[in-house]
Amino acid sequence: MSLSRREYDDLKSVLDKTVHKFLGFSEPTLVSAALDCIDRGYDRKKTVDKLTAMLDTGQASKFVDKVFSVWEEYRSSTKHGRTKKRKDDEKEEGTERVKKRRFADDTASVIPGPGQPSPGQLTADKIKDMMMNAQKMIQERKAQIQATMPPSNPALGTAGLMTDAMDKARRAAELQAQIQARLTGLSQSVPGLKQIALSGPTPLILNEEGQTIDANTGMAVQLQLHTPTLKANIRAKRREQFKGLIDKPPEEISDSKFFDPRVGAKGATRQKRSFKFHDKGKFESLAQRLRTKAQLDRLQNEIASAAKKTGIASAAKLATIVPKKEIKEGDTPDIEWWDYFITIKESYEELPSDKVSRRAMLQGITMLVEHPAQLRPPAEPTKEISIPVYLTKKERKKLRRQNRQEAEKELQEKIRLGLQPPPEPKVRMANLMRVLGTEAVQDPTKIEAHVRAQMAKRQKAHEEANAARKLTTEQRREKKMKKIKEDTTLGVNVNVYRVRDLNNPARKFKIEANANQLFMTGFVVMYKDCNVIVVEGGPKQQRKFRRLMMQRIKWAEDTKKKKDDDDSDSEEEEEKYNKCVLVWEGMTKARAFSEMKFKLCPTESFAREQFRKCGVEHYWDLAFSGAVLETAGEEV
């Protein structure tokens, strides 16, 4: 007995389910052995002996009973299916045979024999009938024509009809000859026609009103303009109209018939270039001015050095910052500044003494209450501000445990309702004997391989789940940017730092790189002994940048001198010489800068101009005045 390929596959799937139900797990070797016994035609006893090597005697006997019962059920179902299929095939074959016979009969009745014409071909009888029908219709038509003839000639008959036809033909020939004679001028060659004198075209003239009239008769003539209807003719006519304009260039204005010589218009003319000579002594005066400026600069440097030696350098520098006019303590002004804008007087003595005249002069003061201008309230936050709740470690463990219990309950409900198959037992090398029991003792090698395969499968599923949850490079970048960026719509935190020496490129790179990484904006002005660093951002960004400027960067290392002996006083002096100072910190309504920029400024006015362009020149004034005071304190 040998199984076919189809029977082998069907039995393999059925026996695989039987083995899984009998043992609790799949075993391909046992399925293959059972199929081999059925294929060789073994009886029950021989099959039990064959499977005893893989199972116990009791288990082998029970398993063989299940295998043979499955085999009998499969044979009976297959036999019934074959019988039913054979009957259906015979029934279909009979139906096809009847259809073929009917089709053959119909075809024999339609297809002509060897002596018969095809269906589309006309026979002699049909042609004869058609001719007879045509003659009959002609006779009926003649009868109708005779019935419609005029009653005045009832006795003419066929001869009368022929005479009328000849008269009509003769008149048509005469009319055609006249037309041909008018066109060709050969009317003399046609006999019996009236001679018509052909002349040239009728002369036309225009009257005082601009109408076209006949020169001979004086009658108005309506000219008919032939308009082409085909698109090809219309395009050709348009080409003829514009051909002259395209081929022939436009005439000059002076040659045109529309040119009026009385108009004195002149065309655009190009001015001739001429030499431009410098005045005598121009470059001598320029050189003299440069020499004077150089001499003045040299004199100012000498004065500055002398003032520095005498100890009044700080006062000279502060004179450029403080206002020119100062009010000494104890002095009383002639008029207060708030009264000066109303009275426009230099002192109170110039005001009139009587109240009426004084009230008439003070027109801006009334009995009404002046309310301050109402400003727009600050913008409300786009999203509701919520205070985050931080749980303790014990609370987080409890919350995680409760979530896992809920998920496990949901899974158990699905398994109980049949929506999800129950998971296979989670077997490890540690709980092998406790889970499998006697099955682990029967074949330890096979059970160990099965357990290790399960462990590898669980490990692979765990790694795949981690890989699926892992963020991509772009998602990690966006997450980091979202964590660093802050909302500055309601206000921007601004910090102003001052550094005396910023020539080290490593320090500049750290400042720029950290500002860009923290998504902060600002401006760095590098000036001699006064480098101003302005940064804008949120409070968290400012804390990180302040730690960089005040702690992480060691500013004193740039100017430390190398000495053989370690002197603490010199170290304090060097640290005082180069350090970072937080000049000012506060909040503004909006950002003044769009990005982080560096600018090298040769003069103090040029540096202040850079801040003035953005409307924050007070940052420079505050930092520069602090630098001046610091320098004066060191010299003192």
Image: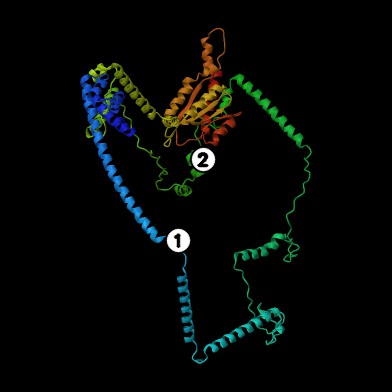
The kind of residue on which mark 2 rests is: Ser
Using the rendered image of the protein, determine whether residue 206 is visible from the camera's viewpoint. Answer: no
**In this view of the protein, which residue sits in the foreground, 442 or 114?**
114
x then y, percent, for residue 471:
41, 30
Q: Identify the residue at horizontal 79%, vertical 44% (top origin).
A: 275
Dividing the picture into quadrants, the one containing residue 111 is bottom left
**How many residues crowd mark 1 within 10 Å: few (<14), some (14–19), many (20+)?**
few
Dividing the picture into quadrants, the one containing residue 466 is top left
Using the rendered image of the protein, determine whether residue 86 is visible from the camera's viewpoint. Answer: yes
x then y, percent, for residue 247:
71, 60
**Residue at the far front in the pictured view:** 115
Horizontal side, residue 630 vs residue 461: left or right: right
The kind of residue on which mark 1 rests is: Pro
For residue 264, the mark is none
User: On the image, numbered disc 2 is attached to which residue?
Assistant: 347
Horizontal side, residue 481 vs residue 245: left or right: left
For residue 114, the mark is 1
**Quarter in which the C terminus is drawn:** top right
Horizontal side, residue 356 vs residue 628: left or right: left
